[in-house]
Every structure is written in structure tokens, then in C-alpha cells.
Image (spheres, rainbow, N blue to C red):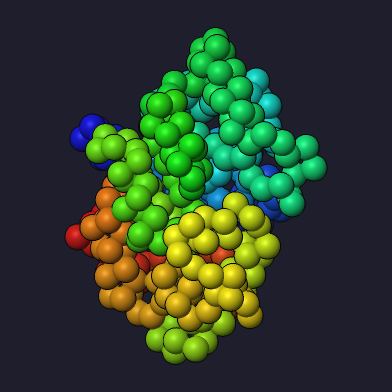
């Protein structure tokens, strides 16, 4: 990965599904714009739009900020045609060159009625992006890659990979599969709560949905977890491997383990009791920015 790419993403970013402009009313959009402005001022390197965002969501976030990189994490190839995405990318690029990175994923069978042959569908989608005029260059897109085939595709046809809900062991395996030059930017879910029982409850509330999705559970089984680790919303062993629980220094130490395993960038998703990842936890974002000051 070039020094320019590393600088563009930074070492630490924020992943949030609450930054969706298209799903908010006027008051909500004002709150999103204010939060995005503050995240930029806090010097986070990248704002990751989680939860199947649209090109319009990305355009609004780019417009609300000045210099920070904005990435979709992850836009579903089933929700938006390649033509729609290409047009949206070109529009953003014309107003803010170099600031938008297109994160693409194949979503999940239980969530997508037309889901079929996900790997082939992604290849076809990337072919369409390449053939567009102007194209969405491979260096401006990342893939939600968990397994070996998609990781290889992320190396061959994109800037790299943005894996979600993964362990440090997966990060090490992904780095080996991607090689030394591709971007590796895993998401890491965070609960800033020193009461570990309560923090694990918050984590389980978020994890429950993902344990219904075979792409994630199959990946966890490949990593050595057992079906029993999925019972009750997740075993302590599973939670401690997937989440950063505790105070900000504990979160920083967990993030460092991902860096040590080969990550170039960490996308932090803050979960709060009662809201999961659906709110704008600005106080927690400030606390983490202070803890990660030497990384930002």
C-alpha cells in the first residue's frame, strides 16, 4: 500500500450506520452533518457509512465535510445497479476529487431475495464498473471480503478488503491472503463500559442478528469456533474475540492487536446500551479520539 493511500485512510476511522442522510428527517440530517464535522475535527481518517448505504448517503457526507475520506461500508451490489453507482461516484468525484472510496459487498442470502452466486455476481459488477465511462478505478474501491476467494478478488480487482465482525486471527490470515500491498481495514465493534457483564450484554444485543447470517457464522467456524459459541447470543470466548470491551485504553490495546496482525486501518463502531450502533455516540467518539491521539 502506498504512503498516499495510508495517509488518505489514516490509521483509525469511525464506522456508523447512523450517518445515513437518506433515512433521516431534517433534524436528523442536521445532527448527522454536525457529527460528521466533529469527527473530521477529531482527526479520524475515514468515515465509514455502515448498514447498506446509498451513493446519495455518501454524497451528503462528503458535502458535510471538507477533507476526510468517506467510504461505504458496505454498499450492497443487490441494492444499487453498477450504472447507478458509477453515476453517483462520478458526481462525488467532480465536486470532491479523491475523497470517496466505494466499499462493495454481496450482503447475505437471508436478507436478499435475489441472492445467487455471490462471487460471480461481484465479478460481473466489477466488470461493469471497469467498463463504465468514466470507470470506477480499482484503486478507489474495497470489498467486504471474509473468505479466501473474495480476499483474492479484493487483491486483484480492488484496493483491498474491509472485513466486518472478524478476529485478530482472521486479520492475520487476511493479510497473508492479500499480500503486503493491499489495504486491510477491518471493522472493530467497541463497547466503552468497564462493567464487563453489562458490556457483553450490549455486544450480544448487536451480535444476535449477525449470528443468523451464514456468511459470518461459516467464517467463525473456519476460525475454530464451535456452534455452541453461537448459543445465547454468543459465548464469552466469542465476544472477547470479536469486540473491544472496557475503557478507552482497553479498546486501544485491542486495536493494536489488529494492527500487529496486519491491519492498515481500524474502523471503530461504537455500541451503546439501548441503541447498539444506531445512534450518534459523540461523547464516546471524543473519548476514543483522545485515547488514539497518537494514531490520528
- Image point (34%, 38%), residue name: 178
Considering only vertical position in the picture, is 28 above or below 61? below
Between 189 and 58, the one lying in front of the other is 189
Q: Quadrant of residue 233?
A: bottom right
Residue 84 in view here? yes
- The single residue placed furthest to the right in the displayed view is 113
- Image point (31%, 76%), residue name: 250
- Image point (35%, 59%), residue name: 169
x, y percentage for residue 268?
A: 42, 60
x, y percentage for residue 282?
A: 46, 66
Between 92 and 261, the one lying in front of the other is 261
x, y percentage for residue 237?
A: 45, 77
Image quarter hosting the C terminus: bottom left
Between 53 and 19, the one lying in front of the other is 53
- Image point (44%, 82%), residue name: 193
Q: Quadrant of residue 28?
A: bottom right
Considering only vertical position in the picture, is 258 above or below 48? below
Image quarter hosting the N terminus: top left
Residue 90 in view here? no
Considering only vertical position in the picture, is 161 above or below 50? above
Q: How many marks?
A: 0
Considering only vertical position in the picture, is 95 above or below 293? above
x, y percentage for residue 204?
A: 58, 76
Between 196 and 10, the one lying in front of the other is 196
Relative placement, left or right, of 247 versus 82 is left
Amino acid at each position: 500500500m502506498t504512503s498516499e493511500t495510508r495517509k488518505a485512510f489514516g490509521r483509525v476511522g469511525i464506522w456508523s450506520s447512523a450517518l445515513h442522510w437518506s433515512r433521516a428527517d431534517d433534524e436528523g440530517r442536521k445532527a448527522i452533518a454536525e457529527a460528521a464535522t466533529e469527527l473530521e475535527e477529531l482527526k479520524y481518517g475515514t468515515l465509514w457509512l455502515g448498514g447498506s448505504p446509498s451513493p446519495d448517503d455518501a454524497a451528503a457526507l462528503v458535502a458535510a465535510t471538507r477533507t476526510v475520506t468517506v467510504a461505504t461500508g458496505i454498499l450492497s451490489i443487490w441494492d444499487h445497479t453498477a450504472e447507478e453507482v458509477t453515476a453517483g461516484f462520478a458526481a462525488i468525484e467532480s465536486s470532491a476529487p479523491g475523497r470517496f472510496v466505494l466499499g462493495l459487498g454481496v450482503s447475505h442470502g437471508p436478507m436478499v431475495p435475489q441472492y445467487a452466486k455471490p462471487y460471480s455476481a461481484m465479478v460481473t459488477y466489477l466488470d461493469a464498473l471497469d467498463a463504465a465511462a468514466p470507470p470506477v478505478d480499482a484503486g478507489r474501491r474495497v470489498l467486504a471480503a471474509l473468505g479466501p476467494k473474495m480476499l483474492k478478488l479484493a487483491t486483484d480487482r480492488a484496493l483491498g478488503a474491509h472485513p466486518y465482525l472478524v478476529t485478530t486471527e482472521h486479520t492475520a490470515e487476511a493479510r497473508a491472503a492479500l499480500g503486503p500491498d493491499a489495504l486491510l481495514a477491518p471493522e472493530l465493534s467497541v463497547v466503552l463500559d468497564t462493567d464487563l457483564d453489562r458490556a457483553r450484554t450490549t455486544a450480544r444485543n448487536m451480535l444476535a442478528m449477525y449470528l443468523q447470517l451464514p456468511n459470518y457464522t461459516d467464517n467463525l467456524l473456519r476460525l475454530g469456533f464451535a456452534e455452541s459459541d453461537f448459543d445465547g447470543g454468543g459465548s464469552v470466548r466469542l465476544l472477547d474475540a470479536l469486540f473491544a470491551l472496557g475503557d478507552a485504553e482497553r479498546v486501544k490495546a485491542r486495536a493494536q492487536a489488529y494492527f500487529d496482525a496486519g491491519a492498515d486501518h481500524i474502523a471503530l463502531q461504537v455500541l451503546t446500551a439501548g441503541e447498539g450502533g444506531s445512534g450518534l455516540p459523540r461523547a464516546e467518539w471524543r473519548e476514543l479520539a483522545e485515547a488514539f491521539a497518537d494514531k490520528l
